[in-house]
Image: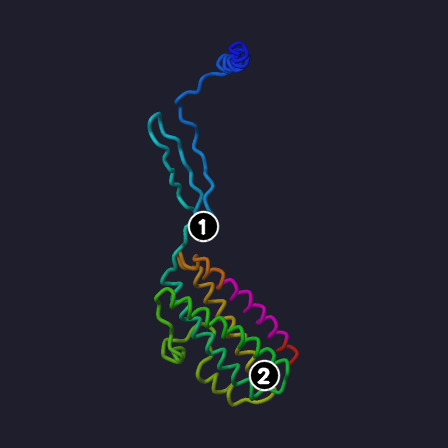
Amino acid sequence: MMRFALLLALPALALAGCRSAGAPAPTATPSPSTTVAAPADQRPRTVQPGAPGEPTREVVAADTHARILHTDADIAFMQGMIGHHRQALEMVELLKTRTEREDMRLLGLRIEVSQQDEIRFMTRWLRERGADVPSEHAHHMPGGMMPGMLTAEEMAALAAARGTEFDRLFLEGMVKHHGGALVMVDDLFREDGAGQEATIYAFASDVVADQQMEIDRMALMLRDLK
């Protein structure tokens, strides 16, 4: 029985001898830093083993994707664009009772739906950041005119027109109005640090794409009208 136990022990002893003879003994030198996967709701952690007798430590790297904060210019842009959109809605309201063309009504509906949706978005954006939302008639006050907006005289002439004359004035006025929105976006991006927050950057970029598309469409409608 003792002999059988010795026979079983011999392979294990031989294997241990080979392992100690063929591979160097581990040292106390710390290994390189290791990135440890984190849960989905946390950023990855980079840990570095400590010296002998010391615990590992987390290496805090700069977060290059840190959230960029809004600026005063961003606030002013959103406030001004709300007033700008509100005048466009006033123009569309006149269109409903003054045009005789179905394509004009469809254009007005598109403008109304998109601008109302954007006003809701801008209002929410301002409130979430503790900023004031312009009053409903702020764009009628002195100094409240944004680029491309129609003057009181131009709005009065639009309200007095009917049929083809209204269509011409509306299209010319809305092309001018949309062009003003593009100027506002351009002015925003010229400000140092402005327009960099992800939400406002995406919104301003969408304004450019949508308004330019409608300008091109209205230019074709004006050409056909004339």
Residue 206: percent from the left, percent from the top?
Answer: 52, 64
Disc 2/disc 1 C-alpha distance (Å): 54 Å
CB under 8 Å between discs 2 and 1: no
- Which of these two is toward me, 164 or 63? 63
- Which residue appears farthest toward the right when viewing the image? 224
Quadrant including the C terminus:
bottom right
Residue 217 belongs to the span the image colors magenta = yes
Colour scheme in the image?
rainbow
**Looking at the image, which residue is at 35% across and 27% down?**
51
Number of the label disc, if any, that sits on residue 167 = 2
Instruction: Determine whether the residue tagged by mark 2 lies in a helix, strand or loop.
Output: helix
- Is residue 153 one of those drawn in magenta? no
- Asked whether residue 141 is in view, the answer is yes
217 left or right, relative to 140: right
Q: Is residue 90 above or below residue 11?
A: below
- Choose the circle earlier in sequence order: 2 or 1: 1
Residue denoted by label 1: 41
Q: Is residue 120 above or below residue 166?
A: above
Crowd class of label 1 (few under 14; some 14 to 19; many from 20; radius 10 Å): few
**Residue 73 horizontal/vertical position (percent):** 38, 63
Q: Please report the bounds of the magenta region as a residue range.
A: 204-220
Give the x, y percent position of residue 78. Answer: 42, 68
Q: Main secondary structure of the magenta part?
A: helix
Between marks 2 and 1 in the image, the one whose residue lies nearer the viewer: 1
Residue located 63% across and 80% down the image: 103
Type of amino acid under label 1: Asp
Q: Amino acid at mark 2?
A: Asp
Bin the neighbour count of mark 2 within 10 Å (Cα to Cα): few under 14, some 14-19, many 20 and up: many
Q: Which mark is residue 13?
A: none
